[in-house]
Image: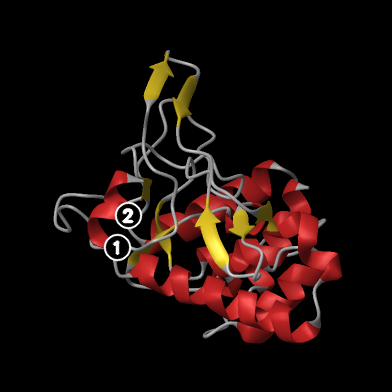
Amino acid sequence: MKLVKHNIPDFPIPEYQHSAYGSPDFGQIFMDVVPGSTLKSTWSGLDDTTRERICRETWAWVLLLRQIPKPSEQSLPFQYCADGFPSHDVLIEDLQKPPRSLLDDAAVRNRIYERYRHYHGERFAKELPDMLPRLNHSAFTHGDISQNIMIDESHSVIGIIDWETAGWYPEYWEYANVVKPGSEREWGEWMDRTAPQRWNLEGIKAARRALF
């Protein structure tokens, strides 16, 4: 959150932090309360014009996040979280302990494939690596934005919360998480419709079917 505020002062993010507690396995940060309502709780009562506007606002913030530079581009891996540790995202969490760094795009695709086979993915046993998106750089992203948007009485985005998964991922990562099947399906369809860029996610979808 400090990183986001430093690079994008106007970003709608809670004020960090009043106090914090941490242990090797658990941590809490106490922050200002973000006013307003969750988008999830108000979505069903919104008209289509408002839904489209909110989705476009959300994508605008996502695009701003992608512009945040890595602190040291030459010395850091391709994918890592803002706290410096590897991601626990179900697609790329390492099966080995301690987790291995993901140094480039090929390593990300190999990790997805490794987990696919580990969890008995068979249908695309040979094809999956070539089905996955390929990118030569990673970008900063929230990682779980779908459940964590706050809006005000005029239905504008005023807060994006819960940043524990934030970090540098392939550029398609937020898009892939937004449009994945789940309880927010209708919102995901609107986000897909308004996305400034779309990726072919057939490989990601195949991997998710094996993992879930």
**Residue that carries the numbered disc 2 in the rendered image:** 4
Residue shown at 47% from the left, 76% from the top = 60
Please state if 154 lies on the left or on the right of 71 as rendered.
Answer: right
Distance from Cα at disc 2 to Cα at disc 1:
6 Å
Quarter occupied by residue 199 = bottom right
Q: Is residue 177 left or right of residue 27?
A: right
Q: Is residue 25 left or right of residue 20?
A: right
Q: Kindly tell me whether residue 181 is visible in this rendering.
A: no
Residue 148 against residue 154 in the figure, above or below: above
Residue at screen point 44% across, 46% down: 14
**Judging from the image, what secondary structure is the residue with disc 1 in?**
loop
Quarter occupied by residue 53 = bottom right
- Crowding at dot 2, Cα within 10 Å, few <14 / some 14-19 / many 20+, comes out as some
Between residue 176 and residue 19, name the one nearer to us: 19
Between residue 151 and residue 80, name the one nearer to us: 151
Question: Residue 165: where, in percent of width, then height?
Answer: 49, 45
Q: Are marks 2 and 1 in contact (CB under 8 Å)?
A: yes
Name which residue type carries label 2.
Answer: Val
- Residue lying at 36% horizontally and 32% vertically, measured from the top left: 17
Q: Position of residue 97 (x, y in %)?
A: 45, 26
Residue 29 seen from this side? yes
Name the residue beneath numbered marker 1.
Answer: 8
Picture coordinates of residue 155, whole percent (x, y): 66, 69
Secondary-structure class at tag 2: helix
